[in-house]
Amino acid sequence: MDQRTTTIECDSCGANNRVPLSRLKDRPKCGKCGARLPLGGGPITVTDANFDETISTSPVPVIVDFWAPWCGPCRMIGPTLEKLAGQMPHDVLIAKLNVDENPGVASRFQVRSIPMLLGFVEGEAVDTQIGALPPSALEGWVRRVIDKGRMIAD
């Protein structure tokens, strides 16, 4: 039996909730106030070591930003992704993968140009965006990935 857990802070009452990774897809509620826990948000850092587990256990769509610190366009879209993660913590998880430090995943998804965004739903890649977008267009793309997640869930 899988006993690995994660701790999620309730955005309603601030209580910390320990949740087994195997239960994330059940959309857990806060043990103190009963509010639905924010299962998305971010941005979080993913690596070659935790990428597959993060993508496969997420109950919400995941947007992975393949980036590098030396990339100007990557730094341009970063604040917008952070803002979207904060605005939609129940709808999407924003993850960042540094391609210089994590060549395994970058190679697996044939990342040749950055920034590259991949949208995942239930562990499967459903959409790709290569290059920087203006904030409104980036938000529209993220919302389309979320909508694809809703269509798959229905």
Image (cartoon, grey):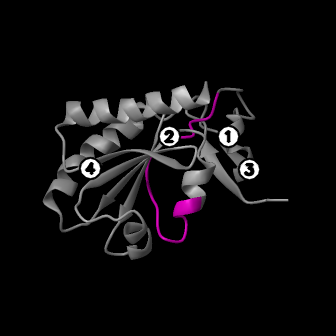
In space, the residues marked 3 and 1 are separated at their CA atoms by 7 Å
Q: Earlier in the sequence, mark 2 or mark 3?
A: 3
Magenta-drawn segment: 36-52
Residue occupied by mark 4: 78
Q: Earlier in the sequence, mark 2 or mark 1?
A: 1
Figure check: 120 above or below 26 = below
Where residue 79 appears, as percent x and y from the top left, is 25, 45
Residue in the image at 38% along x and 71% along y: 107
Taking the image as shown, residue 150 lies to the left or right of residue 146, namely right
Instruction: Please state which amino acid type lies under the numbered disc 3.
Output: Ser
Q: Nearer the viewer, residue 131 or 93?
A: 131
Residue occupied by mark 1: 25
Residue in the image at 59% along x and 37% along y: 14
Where residue 145 appears, as percent x and y from the top left, is 41, 35
Residue occupied by mark 2: 61
In space, the residues marked 2 and 1 are separated at their CA atoms by 11 Å
Q: Earlier in the sequence, mark 3 or mark 4?
A: 3
Number of other residues with Cα within 10 Å of mark 1, as a class: few under 14, some 14 to 19, many 20 or more: some
Number of other residues with Cα within 10 Å of mark 4, as a class: few under 14, some 14 to 19, many 20 or more: some
- Which is in the foreground here, disc 4 or disc 1? 1
Taking the image as shown, residue 143 lies to the left or right of residue 69, namely right
